[in-house]
Amino acid sequence: MTTAFAEEVVLIDGDNRVIGRAEKLRAHLEGRLHRAFSVFVFDDRGALLLQRRALGKYHSGGRWSNTCCGHPRPDEGTQAAAERRLEEEMGFRCALRPAFEFRYRARVGPLLHEHEHDTIFVGTHTGTPAPDPGEVAEWRYAPLDQVRSELRQRPNRFTVWLRLL
C-alpha cells in the first residue's frame, strides 16, 4: 500500500493534456496544475452526503467537504479513480456520472496550493456509509439549502473547493 505522500498525480497543461506526473505533495507545494475529481452523492430525497475530513489529513483536516475527492493515478481514468476513491473513503459503491469540470487555484495551507482541473461526479446512494476513519472523521446527509446556509454563515468550516462549488 502506498502512502498519500508517495502517490503521484497527473500533471496537465492548460488544455487538459497530460504533460507528466509528480508526487502528490510536491505538486501541492509547487502549485502545479493536475487532474482531480470531486464526488457528490445524494440520497433519494436530494440531501447531500457530506464528510468531515479526518484531522490527520495533510491539508484541510477537520473541515466539512463533499462526499469524497481525490486524484486519478497515472494511467487511471478519472471515472475509475472516482469510483475507487468513493469505496476507499466512504465504504460503498454507486453509479457515478460526470456532471461538469472546472479549474481552480486556492491556498489550502501555509505552504500548500491546490491548482486542479476538477471533474465533478454525481451519484445516488440510500445506504449507510462505512467510512475509513483515517480519511473521514464523521459524515452526515444535509439538504442543499442547509449546506448553502452553513457555507454562508461559517465558510471556514468547509473545504475551499466545496465553497467554490
Image (cartoon, rainbow, N blue to C red):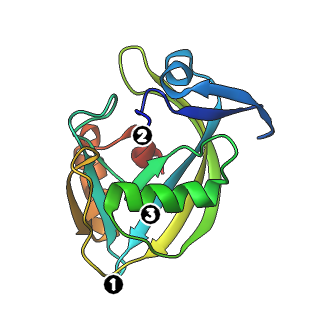
**Which is more N-terminal, label 3 or label 1?**
3
- In this view, the mark in front (2 or 1): 2
Sort mark 1 into few (<14), some (14-19) or many (20+) by Cα contacts within 10 Å.
few
Kindly indicate whether the residue at mark 3 contacts the one at mark 1 (C-beta within 8 angstroms): no
Q: How much space separates mark 3 and mark 2, taking CA atoms?
A: 26 Å
At x 36%, y 15%, the residue is: 110
Quadrant of the image for the N terminus?
top left
- Left or right of 129 on screen, residue 29: right
**Which is more N-terminal, label 2 or label 3?**
2
On the image, numbered disc 3 is attached to which residue? Answer: 40
x, y percentage for residue 11?
69, 31
Above or below 129: residue 5:
above
Above or below 136: residue 122:
below
Sort mark 2 into few (<14), some (14-19) or many (20+) by Cα contacts within 10 Å.
few
Residue type marked 1: Arg
Residue type marked 3: Phe
x, y percentage for residue 26?
53, 19
- In this view, the mark in front (3 or 2): 2
On the image, numbered disc 2 is attached to which residue? Answer: 1
At x 35%, y 41%, the residue is: 159
x, y percentage for residue 56?
23, 33
